[in-house]
C-alpha cells in the first residue's frame, strides 16, 4: 500500500470548520476513500502546544449500526473505537452497549454505520455534541477489509483533531524488540497492540529501533553477521536491512534528525564511546563529543538544533544537552541518581528519561531547561521511554507485572496501561510518527 | 531512499568479509601438508625461471589451545578498571597467547543487568578494550583480537542477585 487518501489533514478540517454547515466532497486518493465531510459547530476546540495530559472530556461510544457477526463486524469496530478514544487520553469513554452505574453525563457521543461490501469496509463515522446531538464531525471512510482497523483508528484520530486541533495517534505503530532465549528480534505492531509480527529472524541481537521522521524506515542496532554491533536500516514492509555504519567498535543508539538528513549515533572508532552525526546514508562521520567518559544515547530536539545525550563525565551517567553541531554542552539533570535514555517530546517542551531508584529505573520528565523534573512512572524497572507523536503519551518497557512488556502512560498520574504483546518479552519500544494518509 | 553504489558495495564487502571469516574458521581438511611439487634439483633448465615460490611452510600443528582456555576477567560494578584478580588472569592469558601465536580470539565485553541498554553497551566496550589494551601492552599484537561489546544482552547467569551480577560483569574470550 503506498497511498492513503484522507480528509486532507489538518488544514482542510480547520478551514471546513470555519464554514458552518458546509458539506463538501473531498477527492479520493488511493485505496482509501473519504466521500463526505461535514464539520460544523465550534465545539470545544483547544490547540495544545504542551506535552502531557489535559482533562478528559466525557464521551459516550454508541454502537455502530451494521453486521454484528462475521469478520470485521460492527461489534469488532465498536471495541476498537472505544479503546482508541479512551487511549487518546482526550476522552473519558463510556460504552453505551455496556452501561455502568457511574457513567458520567457525556459531553459528546460517537456512532455511525459500519458496512462490509465484499472486500471493502465502509465507516460512516459521527461525532456529535450531547444532549443536543448536533454534528461535530461526520465523515465517511472506506478501505480494504484486511485493514478495517485503520478505518476505525483514523476516525478516532479525526475525533481527537476536531476537539483538540491536533490529530490523535491511534493510526500509528510501535517498533520494539522481543527477547527469544539469548537473542533479540525486531518486531512491529499497531499502537493498540494488534497485528504484532516479527521483522527479523537473524537469531542475533537487535537493539534501539528508531523511526525515520516520515515513518517509512527503522534504524536499529544489530549484531547480525557476528562482527559486533552495527547500525542498519530497514523498511518494515520490505524487511531488507541495509548497513548504515559498521565502523570498528560500537555503532549504536542511532536516530534520524527531524528533517531526515542526518543520523545521530554512538561510535567508538576513535577509541571511546562518543556521539557522532552521520549523513543519512551513514557517511561523513562528524564527532560531536570529545571526553574520556562514556557519551551515548543521543536524542534530537524537534527543531533539530540540539541533542540530548547521556554522559558519565560527572562520575555517574546523567543527561546533557549540546548544540547539534557540537559545543555548548550543559548538564540537564541534577539531584537524581544514574540517568539515561533521554527522549525529547515532539512538542519540544519536555524531555523524558530514566533515573535509578533503588534496584530499578523510574521514568521521569523535565522541562527542556532541566527544571520541573517529576516522575511519570514508578514501580518496577522501567526503561526506554519514547514519546508519541502528539506528546500526550510515553511508551516504555517495564517488568512492573513480572516479565518484560510494553506499557503506555498518558502522563496524567493514572496507572500505565499494558500493550498486549502476546506474552512475549518485549522491550526497547519506538513509537512511530503519524502514518502517511496521502494528500 | 536511494542507495548509493558505495553503500551497496560496502554492504557487499561486509557480506563477503563475513563469508570469508566464516571460511577461515573452518579447520583444515587435513593436517598433512599437501605434497609440494618439488622442482627438479639437478636438471639444468636454460630458460630463466622465476624464483620458485617459497615452499609452503608445513602447516603448524593445530593449537591445542582454544579461546575457551583463556580465563574470564571480572569487573566491579559500573567499572572497567582491571583489579589485581583481573590482571593476574590476564597475565596467565598473555602467557598462553604468547605460547600459541596462531590463536586469534574475540574479546567480548559484558555487563550486569543493572543499568540501561545504551550505557551498558558502551561500558561493555570499555571493558573489552581495557582487556585488549592490557594484553597488547604485554606484547600480544592487537591484530590477534577482535573486540565486541554485548552490553547486558548475553548474561552468563540469568539470576537477579549480586552473585549473578558479579558473574555477568566480565570479559570472555571466544573463537574469532
Image: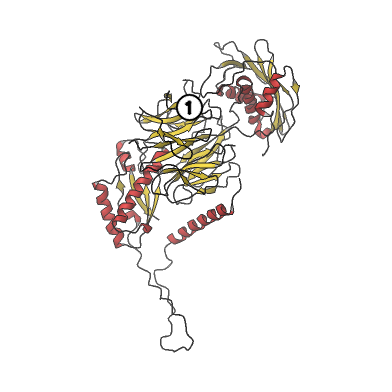
Locate residue A159 relative to residue A251 in the image: left or right: right
If the image is split into quadrants, where does the N terminus of chain A sit? top right
Look at the image and tell me whether residue A426 can be seen. no
Q: As displayed, is residue A210 above or below residue B12? A: above
Q: Quadrant of the C terminus of chain A?
A: top right
Give the tally of numbered discs.
Answer: 1
Residue A208 visible? The answer is yes
Residue closer to the observer: A183 or A166? A166
Residue A239, quarter of picture:
top right
Residue closer to the observer: A402 or A345: A345
Give the residue at mark 1: A350
- The image's colour scheme reads secondary structure
Taking A432 as reference, is A78 above or below it? above
| Secondary element at tag 1 | strand
**Residue at image coords 37%, 58%:** B144
Q: Position of residue B89 (x, y in %)?
A: 27, 51
A77 to the left or right of A199: right
Q: Position of residue B64 (x, y in %)?
A: 32, 62
Marked residue chain, label 1: A
Q: In which image quadrant can residue B26 be found? A: bottom left
Q: Percent from the top left, x then y, of residue A385?
A: 47, 31
Amino acid at each position: 500500500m503506498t497511498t492513503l487518501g484522507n480528509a486532507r489533514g489538518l488544514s482542510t478540517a480547520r478551514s471546513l470548520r470555519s464554514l458552518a454547515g458546509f458539506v463538501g466532497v473531498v477527492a479520493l486518493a488511493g485505496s482509501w476513500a473519504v466521500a463526505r465531510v461535514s464539520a460544523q459547530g465550534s465545539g470545544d476546540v483547544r490547540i495544545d502546544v504542551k506535552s502531557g495530559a489535559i482533562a478528559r472530556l466525557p464521551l459516550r461510544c454508541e454502537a455502530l449500526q451494521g453486521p454484528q457477526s462475521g469478520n470485521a463486524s460492527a461489534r469488532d469496530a465498536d471495541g476498537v473505537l472505544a479503546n482508541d478514544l479512551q487511549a487518546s487520553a482526550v476522552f473519558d469513554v463510556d460504552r453505551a452497549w455496556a452501561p455502568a452505574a457511574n457513567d458520567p453525563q457525556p459531553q459528546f457521543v460517537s456512532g455511525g454505520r459500519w458496512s462490509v461490501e465484499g472486500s471493502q469496509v465502509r465507516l460512516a463515522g459521527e461525532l456529535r455534541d450531547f444532549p443536543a446531538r448536533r454534528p461535530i464531525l461526520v465523515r465517511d471512510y472506506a478501505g480494504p477489509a484486511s485493514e478495517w482497523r485503520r478505518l476505525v483508528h483514523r476516525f478516532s484520530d479525526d475525533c481527537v483533531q476536531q476537539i483538540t486541533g491536533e490529530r490523535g495517534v491511534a493510526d500509528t505503530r510501535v517498533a520494539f524488540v522481543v527477547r527469544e532465549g539469548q537473542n533479540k528480534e525486531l518486531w512491529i505492531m499497531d499502537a493498540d497492540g494488534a497485528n504484532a509480527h516479527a521483522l527479523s529472524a537473524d537469531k542475533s541481537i537487535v537493539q534501539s529501533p528508531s523511526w525515520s521522521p516520515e515513518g517509512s524506515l527503522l534504524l536499529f542496532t544489530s549484531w547480525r553477521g557476528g562482527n559486533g554491533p552495527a547500525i542498519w536500516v530497514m523498511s518494515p514492509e520490505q524487511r531488507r536491512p541495509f548497513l548504515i555504519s559498521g565502523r570498528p567498535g560500537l555503532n549504536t543508539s542511532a536516530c534520524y534528525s527531524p528533517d531526515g538528513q542526518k543520523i545521530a549515533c554512538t561510535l567508538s572508532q576513535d577509541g571511546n564511546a562518543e556521539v557522532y552525526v552521520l549523513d543519512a546514508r551513514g557517511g561523513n562521520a562528524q564527532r560531536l563529543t570529545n571526553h574520556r567518559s562514556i557519551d551515548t544515547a543521543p536524542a534530537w530536539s524537534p527543531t533539530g538544533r540540539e541533542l540530548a545525550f547521556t554522559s558519565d563525565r560527572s562520575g555517574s551517567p546523567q543527561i546533557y544537552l549540546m548544540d547539534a553541531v557540537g559545543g555548548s554542552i550543559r548538564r540537564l539533570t541534577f539531584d537524581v541518581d544514574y540517568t539515561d535514555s533521554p527522549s525529547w517530546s515532539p512538542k519540544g517542551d519536555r524531555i523524558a528519561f530514566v533515573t535509578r531508584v533503588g534496584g530499578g529505573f523510574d521514568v521521569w520528565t523535565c522541562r527542556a531547561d532541566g527544571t520541573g523534573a517529576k516522575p511519570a512512572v514508578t514501580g518496577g524497572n522501567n526503561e526506554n521511554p519514547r514519546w508519541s507523536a502528539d506528546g500526550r503519551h510515553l511508551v516504555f518497557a517495564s517488568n512492573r507485572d513480572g516479565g518484560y512488556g510494553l506499557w503506555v502512560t498518558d502522563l496524567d498520574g493514572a496507572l500505565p496501561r499494558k500493550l498486549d504483546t502476546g506474552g512475549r518479552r518485549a522491550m526497547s519500544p519506538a513509537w512511530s510518527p503519524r502514518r502517511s494518509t496521502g494528500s | 531512499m536511494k542507495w548509493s553504489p558505495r553503500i551497496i558495495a560496502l554492504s557487499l564487502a561486509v557480506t563477503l568479509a563475513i563469508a570469508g571469516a566464516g571460511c577461515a574458521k573452518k579447520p583444515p581438511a587435513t593436517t598433512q601438508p599437501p605434497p609440494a611439487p618439488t622442482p627438479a634439483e639437478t636438471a639444468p633448465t636454460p630458460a630463466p625461471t622465476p624464483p620458485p615460490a617459497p615452499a609452503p611452510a608445513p602447516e603448524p600443528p593445530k593449537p591445542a589451545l582454544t579461546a575457551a582456555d583463556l580465563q574470564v576477567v571480572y569487573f566491579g560494578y559500573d567499572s572497567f578498571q582491571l583489579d589485581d584478580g583481573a590482571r593476574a588472569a590476564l597475565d596467565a592469558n598473555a602467557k598462553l597467547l604468547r605460547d600459541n601465536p596462531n590463536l586469534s580470539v574475540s574479546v567480548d565485553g559484558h555487563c550486569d543487568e543493572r543499568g540501561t541498554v545504551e550505557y551498558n553497551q558502551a561500558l561493555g566496550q570499555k571493558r573489552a578494550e581495557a582487556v585488549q589494551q592490557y594484553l597488547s601492552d604485554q606484547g600480544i599484537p592487537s591484530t590477534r583480537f577482535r573486540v565486541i561489546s554485548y552490553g547486558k544482552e548475553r548474561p552468563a547467569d540469568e539470576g537477579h542477585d549480586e552473585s549473578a551480577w558479579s558473574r555477568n560483569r566480565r570479559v570472555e574470550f571466544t573463537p574469532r
